[in-house]
Amino acid sequence: MKALAFGEVLWDVNGNEKTIGGAPLNVLAHIRKLGGESSIVSAVGSDELGRASLACLEDFGISEQYVRISPFPTGRADVVLENGIPSYEFNMPCAWDDIRLSDDQYADLFNDEFSVLIYGTLAQRCLTSALTLGKLLDDVSAAEFFFDVNLRGNFYNEKSIERGLEKATIIKMNDEELPVVASLLDTGKDSLIRWLFDNTCVRKVLVSAGSRGSFCHEKGGQVYHAQASDVSVIDTVGAGDSLSAAFLYFLSQGMDTGSALEKASVLADYVVTKRGAVPEYDEELRKRLSL
């Protein structure tokens, strides 16, 4: 599997703790742990957090070939957990508002072949990064286009949803985001998935639903469900990203949708029992994932 992601590299700041994150990076880090290749199109500042970001990318094994060093500060999100549920305050402007590539970098990307291009709404909040995403969606060659809705604060609108859907073959959202997306697209909550299948290139809709587990709706009408395990939740930061990563990885290995969802649920259930979005995998988990 060869994955490319576009979007934010940032630091989750929880009190005195700083943990690297950002949904695109989290997904890629898990894909690397699972056995795939990963590259990210992003930007960091020429500051301490930016240098730490590049070191973390190297540690994760994520290529930094398409990471810009921006004059803006590295992104950060101050995290507040309430009953295990995170909320975020983002700095703005920051480096990932300034994602841009050179002509040579675009040429390298457009001459390559990827299993999946992963992107969301948050990094579309400023025009520079939104235009870069538009170019990638127009010209990157990928077997799948994975749109992780990932609504944060007020940093989304109808345009960012519509841009994300232009090429998407798989869309992922949680059960709280589903009615918001339906409203933005002027359709009903109960009819959104059918609307996506009828009006876009989307073939699969992945929905995470907390303690109710996760669901995948396919264009042919099939609905798959993976029940969440009864585990002691420590924090939920990054759980949805791990679900996305494992689902994409096991699909790329030829696994059917239902089986890929079950494997993805195993990883997500593990992640919520640990601190941090990308914890180390223990031996029991690796066996359950057949790694």
Image (tube, helix red, strand yellow):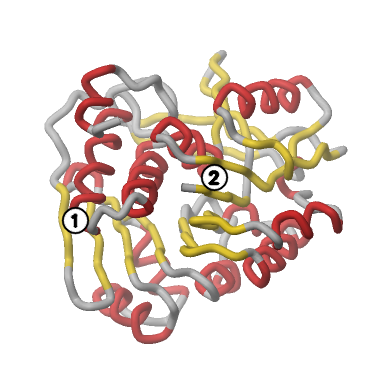
Q: Residue at x 65, y 36 (%)?
A: 63
Residue located at (67% from left, 21% from top)? 55
Left or right? Give the position of 43 relative to 4.
right
Tell me if residue 239 comes above or below residue 119 in the rendering: above
Nearer the observer, 145 or 122 = 145
Residue 113: percent from left, percent from top: 59, 58
| Mark 2, secondary structure of its residue | helix
The residue shown at (74%, 36%) is 44
Rendered-image quadrant of the C terminus: top left
Secondary structure of residue under mark 1: helix
Q: Looking at the picture, does residue 171 appear above or below residue 24?
A: below
Residue shown at 79%/52% (left/top)? Answer: 105
Percent coordinates x, y for residue 154 in the rendering: 57, 56
Query: Pointer 2: residues within 10 angstroms few (<14), some, or many (20+)?
Result: many
Residue at mark 2: 24
Q: What's under tag 1, amino acid-wise?
A: Gly
Amino acid type indicated by mark 2: Pro
Marks 2 and 1: CB-CB under 8 Å?
A: no
**Number of the label disc, if any, that sits on residue 258:** 1
Q: Is residue 145 left or right of residue 155?
A: left
Could you say which quadrant of the image residue 189 lies in?
Answer: bottom left
